[in-house]
Image (cartoon, helix red, strand yellow):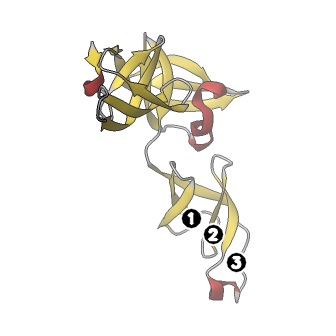
Amino acid sequence: MLSYTDLTPGTQFILDGEPYEVLDYQFIRMQQRKPSVQTKIKNLISGKIVAKTFQPSDVVKEADIERETIKFIYAHRGEYIFQKPDNPKERFSLLESLLGNSAKYLKPDLEVTAYKFNEKIINIELPVKIDYKVKDAPPGFKGDTATGGNKLVTLENDLQINVPLFIETGDVVRINTESGEYTERINKA
């Protein structure tokens, strides 16, 4: 069991039967009152962030969250098929509703971290930066580069992002999955 002072950033615990992670922690002590801890916590299933104050009498159970590496294979009609890297025969599917925003960054053979709570996958974590091949890029016209503009390109997984004008079809670019932005060109076509 965790007391209210144990709820430091990164701590995972169970509240109302669901796993949460502490994002922000502030110990408050006012005159003539009992001390308390103000936190910002994230629901690990829904991703919702809430503010909650804990008192000295509050105790919570530590969450047993397992991490496991899994490999994405392909997507079909809102289902995303994964396998365990060491056992290609052990395949399973996850729904798009569970993956949320992460689904648009998946590409075949990409290894991700799965978070399991009570033997059930509740969320996945992508690598922060992933390399993609540019499938379709409109040409950049001479004279456009004076202002350092951007253009919209389509990547190998059909994701569309803004990139600098010098990016061409066939180039390999690195994307930040947290912000969804172009970071750099890795290989020129």
* Vertical arrangement, residue 76 with respect to residue 87, above or below: below
Judging by the rendered image, the residue that carries numbered circle 2 is 168
Figure disc tally: 3
Which amino acid type corresponds to the residue marked 2 in the rendered image?
Answer: Glu
The quadrant in which the C terminus is found is: bottom right
Quarter location, residue 69: top left
Secondary structure found at label 1: loop
Residue for point 37% across, 24% down: 54
Q: Which mark is residue 140?
A: 3
Label 1 environment density (alpha carbons within 10 Å; few <14, some 14–19, many ≥20): some
Label 3 environment density (alpha carbons within 10 Å; few <14, some 14–19, many ≥20): some
Q: Which mark is residue 43?
A: none
Secondary structure found at label 3: loop
Q: Position of residue 29 (x, y in %)?
A: 29, 35
Quick check: 188 left or right of 59? Answer: right
Which amino acid type corresponds to the residue marked 1 in the rendered image?
Answer: Asp
Counting residues from the N terminus, which is met first, the one under dot 1 or under dot 3? 3
Tell me whether the residue at label 2 lies in contact with that at label 1, contact meaning CB atoms closer than 8 angstroms.
Answer: yes
Q: Which mark is residue 171?
A: 1
Residue for point 51% across, 31% down: 50
Q: For the residues marked 1 and 3, what is the alpha-carbon distance in whole angstroms? A: 14 Å
Q: Position of residue 20 (x, y in %)?
A: 43, 24
Viewer-proximal residue among 111 and 126 = 126
Q: Position of residue 161 (x, y in %)?
A: 65, 58
* Vertical arrangement, residue 167 with respect to residue 11, above or below: below
Residue 8 shows in the view? yes
> Nearer the viewer's eye, disc 1 or disc 3?
3
Tell me whether the residue at label 2 lies in contact with that at label 3, contact meaning CB atoms closer than 8 angstroms.
Answer: yes
Which amino acid type corresponds to the residue marked 3 in the rendered image?
Answer: Gly
Q: For the residues marked 2 and 3, what is the alpha-carbon distance in whole angstroms? A: 8 Å
